[in-house]
Image: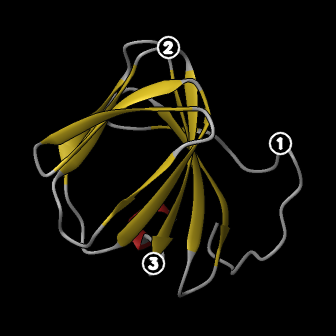
Amino acid sequence: MTETKIFAQPGEGEWVTTPDGNRRRVVLFTDELMVVQFAFRKNGVGDLHSHPHVQSSYVAEGRFEVTIDGVTETIAAGGSFIVPSNRVHGVKALEDGLLVDTFTPHRADFL
């Protein structure tokens, strides 16, 4: 996927296995903004990491233990969180779950 995508229909996009064993699917993106779905199995971990992008995440399904800069909270479906630029963060799925993440600017490494 290399063209700007501004509309998406349910089920579009290819799921890719992430280095930590979960799955992600780029939904939409422009140069300024990207929407990505991340699917986790129960006990799946999104390893601690950081990036220069600002990230906003919405918990669409499940419950996650979310850690940002050493502070951990449990966020359930319908909840959300923001990761400021360059903050160390990660998640653990307490049950099967789905995150909808937005990144600004877009994550070129996901394309």
**Occupied quadrant, residue 104:** bottom left
Percent position of residue 43, x then y? 37, 13
Three-letter code, disc 3: Thr
For this view, does 68 lie left or right of residue 101? left
Question: On screen, 6 above or below 89?
Answer: below
Seen at 84% across and 70% down, the residue is 7
Question: On screen, 26 above or below 37?
Answer: below
Mark 1, secondary structure of its residue: loop
Cα gap from disc 3 to disc 1, whole angstroms: 23 Å
Seen at 83% across and 42% down, the residue is 11
Percent position of residue 103, x then y? 47, 69
Q: Judge the density around disc 1: few (<14), some (14-19), many (≥20) Cα neighbours within 10 Å.
A: few
Percent position of residue 91, x then y? 32, 35
- In this view, the residue in front, 17 or 7, is 7
Q: Nearer the viewer, mark 2 or mark 3?
A: 2
Seen at 57% across and 24% down, the residue is 62
**Lower sequence index among marks 3 and 1:** 1
Cα gap from disc 2 to disc 3, whole angstroms: 28 Å
- In this view, the residue in front, 56 or 23, is 56
In this view, the residue farthest toward the right is 9
Q: Which mark is residue 104?
A: 3
Three-letter code, disc 1: Gly
Q: Judge the density around disc 3: few (<14), some (14-19), many (≥20) Cα neighbours within 10 Å.
A: some
**Residue on which the image places disc 1:** 11
**Residue on which the image places disc 2:** 95
